[in-house]
Amino acid sequence: MEKLKNLFKAKADAQAAELKELLKEHGTKKIGEVQLAQAFQGMRGVTGMVYETSLLDSNEGIRFRGFSIPELQAKLPKAKGGTEPLPEGIFYLMLTGEIPTDADVAELSAEWRKRSPIPTHAFKAIDALPPDTHPMTQVMTGILCMQTDSVFAKEYAKGANKKDYWSYVYEDSMNMIASLPQVAAYVYRRKYHGGKTIAPDPQLDWGANFAHMLGYDTEGFRELMRLYMTIHADHEGGNVSAHTSHLVGSALADPYLSFTAAMAGLAGPLHGLANQEVIKWIFAMQKDLGVEVPSKEQIETYVKKMLADGKVVPGYGHAVLRKTDPRFTAQMDFAKKHMPNDPAVKTVWAIYEAVPPILQSLGKIKNPWPNVDAHSGALLVHYGMKEYEFYTVLFGVSRALGVQAAQIWSRALGFPIERPKSVTIQNVKDWLAGKDEIWE
Ligand code: AMX
């Protein structure tokens, strides 16, 4: 796959030269102001990093290299007979900025098949964990163990030239992305199917092969995996998983280390774990109310009680988005096409009618609309994947495409170690009292 690597290198060299000039001329220009409250509120709205692969518009949602999700669904190559984009295509796009051809994507599929072997000690390390260990912990263990094969770590130890870092990160990223479906499927089959693993099928594309190794061989589930892997891939740089990858990678920790760290962030319930929380909550609501598809009125009463008890409605709200997440809409469209009468799906849609006005009425929530996690579980349940603790792993496998493409860019552009300034509350008080200058 030298073609993709060479194309990337040509693009990155041109970008690096342009960037040098841009910073020489405009490097001292101000791009914003930071208010005191922002330092205490998760740095929301503070622009402080460059992340090439995607950009989030608070109203329109995510754009990957300028393309919205509906545009990607139309433009990216599909599997034969399929209608959903192949995830290989979004990786190619994020890496190069170009929409790939069918041949480009077929080549990438073949390359990932070739690179997928996994060291046996990774499986042994997973096997050493109790089977009921959360799937995210098991998968992170597997990824961390593959670090023994890191090309970057080996070359760095030998004294690599910093101009070549990107090349080793590229190799590690490609190898890791190729291996992830098998590691994830191993954990799924270990935890939920008595360890009966399924060998990869060399005829299949990356997403379909993942579906196959998980044990779901219908064309519907393959299409779902292709869509799922595409839309969860990236969400600009500031979200917890992408930012963690960016931060840890900036210390020149190799991709296996930085991606394991990103997965740990994704495992938090306010980030990726929300998708398991959503279906768990839907199941609990169905049980508590004793109905398969609760009515809008029943949901309203249920949600008001939850909020009164100090709980969050999972799958609703977003730190940046201010409208319905287009990734929610893409999944809703998939459901309308494939399973419009499914009870879990109908419940998700009833929640979509009931919840936003209630959240809006509280007055404090900046975004009362559903995010990506509000819909994904119901689609998986439809195909029989009810083991919701596994859902964040699917999110993570997809997220590797975005954060690794971004990481290759970061090393190619020579981005330095990230090190923002922090202060203490006493510093702030002193500064307010005019005693101390804290802002450097
Ligand atoms: N249900 C109840 N309350 C909510 C809420 C929700 N879904 N979303 C926000 N709020 C509350 C916050 O807890 C906060 O309350 P407080 O002032 O009493 O502490 C207030 O509304 C203001 O919050 P905000 O500025 O609108 O949101 P945020 O940027 O602080 O947080 C998020 C964003 C996603 C963490 C939050 O909306 C949330 O907890 N949602 C539910 C969990 C979820 O769906 N996470 C997945 C996000 C997508 C992803 O990363 N995968």
Image (cartoon, rainbow, N blue to C red):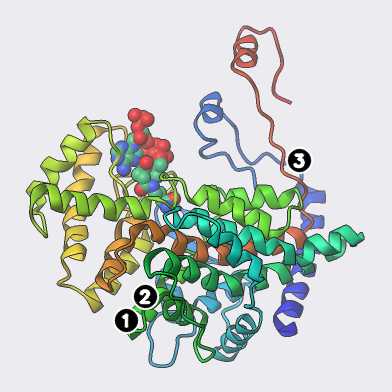
Amino acid type assigned to the residue bearing label 3 in the image = Thr
What secondary structure is marked by label 1? helix
Classify the position of ligand 1 by quadrant: top left, top right, bottom left or bottom right.
top left
Cα–Cα gap, marks 1 and 3: 52 Å
Residue located 57% across and 67% down the image: 401
- Give the number of the disc on residue 28: 3
Is the residue marked 3 within 8 Å of ligand 1, measured from its CB? no
In this view, 45 is above or below 210: above
Between 280 and 31, the one nearer to me in the picture: 280
Position of the C terminus, as image quadrant, is: top right
> Of discs 3 and 2, which sits in the foreground?
2
What secondary structure is marked by label 3? loop
- Give the number of the disc on residue 234: none
Mark 1, other Cα within 10 Å: few <14 / some 14–19 / many ≥20: some
Residue located 52% across and 80% down the image: 206
Residue hosting label 1:
220
The reply to whether callout 1 and callout 2 are in contact (CB within 8 Å) is: yes
Between 171 and 7, the one nearer to me in the picture: 171
Residue hosting label 2:
224
Q: Position of residue 258 (x, y in %)?
A: 66, 54
Cα–Cα gap, marks 3 and 2: 46 Å
Q: Position of residue 411 (x, y in %)?
A: 76, 59
